[in-house]
Image: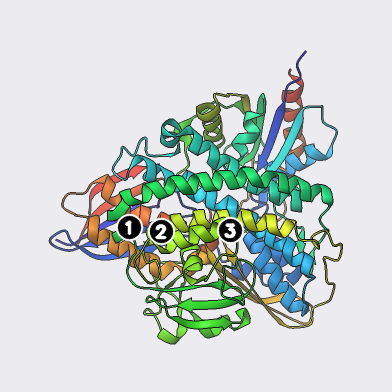
């Protein structure tokens, strides 16, 4: 059986409180044992060169914080390429736009998911997660492991 | 009836911005202003932190140019330590800076500006974007992604895959370069240089098509400020400050960076959170100057690498004499600098001392004030700190590349608006040109405000009573 290549991208600002949960979850995943074929990246923001990494993956899992939902709530949803999700400030991108880049330029459309955790506090100069967001880290990681194990 | 056109925010630049065009009774432009509408107060919330945290803290100002802040901040910390860092550490820092410049310039040219350049200012805004470029010239779009990736890979080879690099430290760098890493970076450079040369060659063929924009995009006289080497050549990491006037005369030269306050004053206006730096001897607002790729090339006698020097000579031929005045040529200057950056990285990596293991000078703080200046992709970046006896920050001043260009950007908007905007027959292409002149400077408003976030574009026409008479939204 051909091994799936999974790319995990955690993104968010490390100085905006709960916004850091994406990269923190990614770092925790990278530190632990991972199946072969899983690559983990932590970023402040999503930028264009990540398309090259996406093109090399069969499955991409984005990890991000959200303001939607009760603080600490973890959600998983599948993502599809969407050029209309284009950011008006293209120094950084939406995950669906990155997928659209991959589709438009390389005709490659990996299976894609967004695993998000609702945060409660996003002000600048805050370096720790709120208790609700901190409690969401482990469930977030668990959802990612389930997605990886699904195939 | 006096009316105001508001463009909020400017698309395809970082942060929050709004452009307001004040129209007179006949629909002519009476005033033009570039506003930064969000305030983050980075300087203030750094107070009380240990100075050694400043590189990591200020790197988080921006997700696009963290390396620039890491370098300027560590240089300010070097100054606090009163050390001269080991020569190999300086070369390694230079490589990292050049990789950042490559990556950042690639984003500006390929992804932010190419839709206008390839598809035209008046083309359908629904397709005048990176996806339009992908359809028209997929190879160019792929080149842009690959060049960014090469820059990112070099940074990661040097500094690891941390979200923000912590390899540069006060006194030098944390680890010496290994032979394996050197080879890995050298392997990437030929492809990067090929892309850079190919793109430069392509862009040269496009430039003649933009005579109109070239003559209206920010051509009003300004001075130019940048770092230069002791020989007056292109410099991005250290060296001395040089200022040329609009006629190309050197008015300040070989000014030590620690004396920047003699040259640069900072004014504030109530319509923007971005400060307005100006050339102090000329006063505010007369002391307008530009920084960044255009200023660096105008100020440099030479680049010092083979292909970049040929490109620099061609750059100077864009105009009959004097400094290149049109801000449209920031695009050209970026491509020359990418070529230079790749050539110079190769030269530095082939330096016999580049693998030297002495890469860090260790000391405690030996001064209470530190200044670090380097060239970020968008221009001269200044970090200035004061600390107390415990090494805690008591005062911070950051003068960001985009801030230096603030007066010039306002001037350029007015010029473009005068040339293209007819308030009685408002068309999207007119307003796109107003935005496009700002994109020439590739402002990073996250750094300059220091703001963060995004909003859809809103263009509003308001009459003298403040009533919205027309509105356009996109993004």
Give the side of residue B368 with respect to residue B220, left or right: right
Which residue is located at x 44 percent, y 60 percent? Answer: B315
Which residue is located at x 31 percent, y 37 percent? Answer: B124
Q: Is residue B64 visible?
A: no
Percent x, y for residue B211?
29, 54
Marks 2 and 3: same chain?
A: yes
Q: Is residue B25 above or below residue B8?
A: below
Q: Which chain is indicated by disc 3?
A: B
10 Å neighbourhood of mark 2: few (<14), some, or many (≥20)? many
Q: Nearer the viewer, residue B468 or B13?
A: B13
Mark pair 2, 3: CA separation: 21 Å
In the picture of the structure, the residue carrying the numbered disc 3 is B306
10 Å neighbourhood of mark 1: few (<14), some, or many (≥20)? some
In the picture of the structure, the residue carrying the numbered disc 2 is B329
Kindly check if marks 3 and 1 are in contact, taking CB atoms under 8 A apart as contact: no
Percent x, y for residue B474?
36, 42
Mark pair 3, 1: CA separation: 27 Å
Q: Is residue B277 above or below residue B474?
A: below
When asked about the image quadrant of residue B260, the answer is: bottom right
Q: Which chain is indicated by disc 2?
A: B
Q: Nearer the viewer, residue B125 or B122?
A: B122
Marks 2 and 3, the one that precedes in the sequence: 3
Marks 3 and 1, the one that precedes in the sequence: 1
Q: Colour mode?
A: rainbow
Marks 1 and 2, the one that precedes in the sequence: 1
Kindly check if marks 1 and 2 are in contact, taking CB atoms under 8 A apart as contact: yes
Tag on residue B214?
Answer: 1
Q: How many marks?
A: 3
10 Å neighbourhood of mark 3: few (<14), some, or many (≥20)? few
**Could you tell me which quadrant the C terminus of chain B lies in?**
top left
Give the side of residue B413 with respect to residue B102, left or right: left
């Amino acid at each position: 059986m051909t091994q799936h290549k999974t790319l995990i991208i955690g993104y968010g600002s490390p100085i905006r409180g709960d916004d850091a949960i994406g990269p923190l979850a990614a770092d925790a995943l990278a530190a632990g044992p991972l199946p072969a074929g899983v690559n983990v990246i932590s970023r402040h923001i999503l930028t264009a060169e990540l398309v090259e990494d996406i093109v090399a993956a069969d499955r991409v899992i984005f990890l991000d914080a959200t303001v939607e939902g009760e603080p600490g709530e973890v959600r998983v949803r599948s993502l599809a390429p969407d050029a209309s999700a284009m950011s008006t400030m293209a120094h950084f991108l939406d995950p669906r736009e990155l997928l659209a880049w991959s589709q438009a330029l390389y005709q490659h459309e990996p299976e894609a998911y967004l695993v998000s955790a609702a945060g409660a506090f996003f002000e600048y100069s805050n370096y720790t997660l709120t208790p609700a967001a901190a409690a969401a880290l482990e469930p977030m990681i668990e959802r990612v492991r389930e997605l990886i194990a699904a195939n | 009836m006096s009316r105001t056109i508001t463009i909020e925010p400017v698309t395809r630049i970082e942060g929050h911005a709004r452009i307001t065009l004040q129209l007179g009774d006949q629909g002519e432009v009476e005033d033009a202003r570039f506003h930064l509408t969000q305030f983050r107060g980075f300087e203030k919330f750094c107070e009380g932190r240990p100075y050694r945290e400043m590189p990591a803290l200020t790197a988080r100002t921006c997700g696009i140019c963290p390396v620039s802040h890491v370098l300027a901040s560590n240089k300010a910390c070097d100054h606090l330590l009163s050390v001269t860092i080991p020569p190999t550490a300086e070369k390694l820092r230079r490589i990292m800076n050049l990789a950042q410049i490559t990556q950042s310039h690639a984003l500006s040219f390929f992804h932010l500006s190419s839709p206008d350049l390839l598809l035209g200012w008046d083309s359908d805004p629904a397709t005048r974007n990176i996806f339009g470029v992908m359809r028209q010239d997929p190879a160019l779009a792929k080149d842009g992604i690959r060049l960014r990736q090469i820059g990112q890979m070099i940074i990661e080879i040097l500094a690891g895959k941390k979200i923000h690099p912590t390899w540069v430290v006060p006194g030098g760098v944390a680890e010496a370069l290994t032979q394996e890493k050197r080879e890995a970076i050298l392997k990437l450079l030929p492809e990067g240089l090929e892309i850079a040369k190919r793109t430069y060659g392509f862009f040269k063929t496009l430039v003649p098509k933009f005579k109109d924009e070239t003559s209206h995009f920010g051509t009003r006289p300004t001075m130019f400020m940048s770092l230069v080497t002791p020989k007056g050549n292109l410099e991005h990491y250290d060296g001395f400050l040089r200022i040329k006037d609009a006629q190309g005369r050197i008015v300040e030269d070989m000014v030590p960076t620690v004396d920047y306050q003699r040259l640069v004053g900072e004014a504030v206006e109530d319509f923007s959170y971005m400060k307005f730096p100006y050339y102090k001897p000329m006063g505010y607002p007369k002391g307008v100057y530009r920084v960044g790729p255009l200023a660096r090339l105008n100020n440099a006698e030479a680049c010092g690498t083979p292909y970049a020097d040929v490109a620099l000579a061609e750059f100077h031929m864009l105009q009959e004499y004097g400094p290149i005045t049109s801000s449209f040529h920031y695009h050209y200057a970026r491509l020359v600098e990418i070529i230079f950056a790749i050539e110079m990285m190769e030269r530095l990596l082939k330096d016999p001392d580049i693998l030297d293991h002495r890469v860090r000078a260790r000391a405690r703080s030996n001064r209470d004030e530190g200044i670090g200046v380097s060239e970020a992709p968008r221009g001269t970046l200044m970090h200035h700190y004061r600390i107390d006896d415990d090494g805690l920050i008591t005062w911070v001043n950051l003068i960001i590349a985009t801030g230096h260009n603030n007066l010039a950007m306002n001037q350029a908007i007015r010029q473009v608006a005068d040339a293209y905007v007819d308030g009685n027959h408002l068309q999207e292409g007119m307003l796109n040109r107003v935005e496009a002149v700002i994109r020439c400077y590739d402002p990073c408003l996250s750094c300059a405000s220091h703001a963060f976030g995004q909003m859809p574009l809103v263009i509003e026409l308001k009459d003298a009573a403040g009533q919205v008479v027309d509105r356009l939204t996109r993004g």
